[in-house]
Image (cartoon, rainbow, N blue to C red):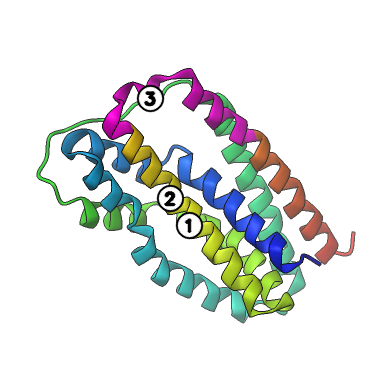
Amino acid sequence: MLFLNEFLVLGVILGFTAGISPGPLMAMTISETLQHGSRAGVKVAISPLITDILIVSCILFFLLRIESHDLIIALICLSGAFYLMYLGVSSFNTSTIDIDIRKERENSFKKGILVNFLSPHPYLFWITIGGPILFQALDVGIWGTVLFVAGFYSLLVGSKIMIAMVVGKSRSFLKSKYYLYMIRALGFVYFIFALFFIEQGLELLSL
């Protein structure tokens, strides 16, 4: 059983790893920053605060319907482990950050919302990773849920805002070895969390 502060730590770590990892929303954040400045990148970065309300609500409604089915929840946990391992391998294999820059009219916030709705990442995360953690948090108390969600979105959004600000001042940051080392180091974090989800899945299967 996890304690309240551990849910906050889980949220912070997962939010940070998701926030700085390459993906559609990260690409859009950087692209808008390079075209229109840091302010436009920040608008994209905060878009999950809008889109994920609907995404998370729908997914939690689905998971609540199957919460009592340990086999299904176990399979979801194991699927989350494989998804985390996939993200870990992707982090290890990252060599360059390529962003397609096409000069377009600024409409950054709407673009960010659209990209996040169409990206598979938030759906996969909340079905296989975030959802099971929220159910564990609810077993501890409502504050476990609040701390996990607050920690996750503070770092998810905050890290993207940080990158938008840094890229706005120094475009060479994306090509620096430090950023690539940071991305690859996240691979180890993903694998650690994958082991946690494998343990949870096997426990539900009573293996």
The numbered mark, 3 or 2, whose residue comes first in the sequence reads: 2
Q: Would you say 165 lies left or right of 53 here?
A: left
Residue 9: image quadrant is: bottom right
Instruction: Quarter of the image for the C terminus: give it.
Output: bottom right
Q: Which mark is residue 158?
A: 2
The numbered mark, 3 or 1, whose residue comes first in the sequence reads: 1
User: Which residue occupies the foreground of this view, 169 or 41?
Assistant: 169
Task: Tell whether label 1 touches label 2 (CB within 8 Å).
Answer: yes
Q: Residue at x 69, y 58 (%)?
A: 77
Q: Residues within 10 Å of mark 1 (few under 14, many from 20)?
A: some
What's the distance in space between the residues labelled 2 and 1, CA to CA?
6 Å
Magenta span includes 147: no
Magenta span includes 178: yes
| Whether residue 195 is situated above or below residue 135 in the rendered picture | above
Q: Which mark is residue 66?
A: none
Estimate the x, y position of residue 62 in percent, counting from the top left: 54, 75
Q: Tag 1's secondary structure?
A: helix
Q: Which residue is mark 1?
A: 154
Q: Which mark is residue 173?
A: 3
Q: Residue at x 62, y 34 (%)?
A: 187
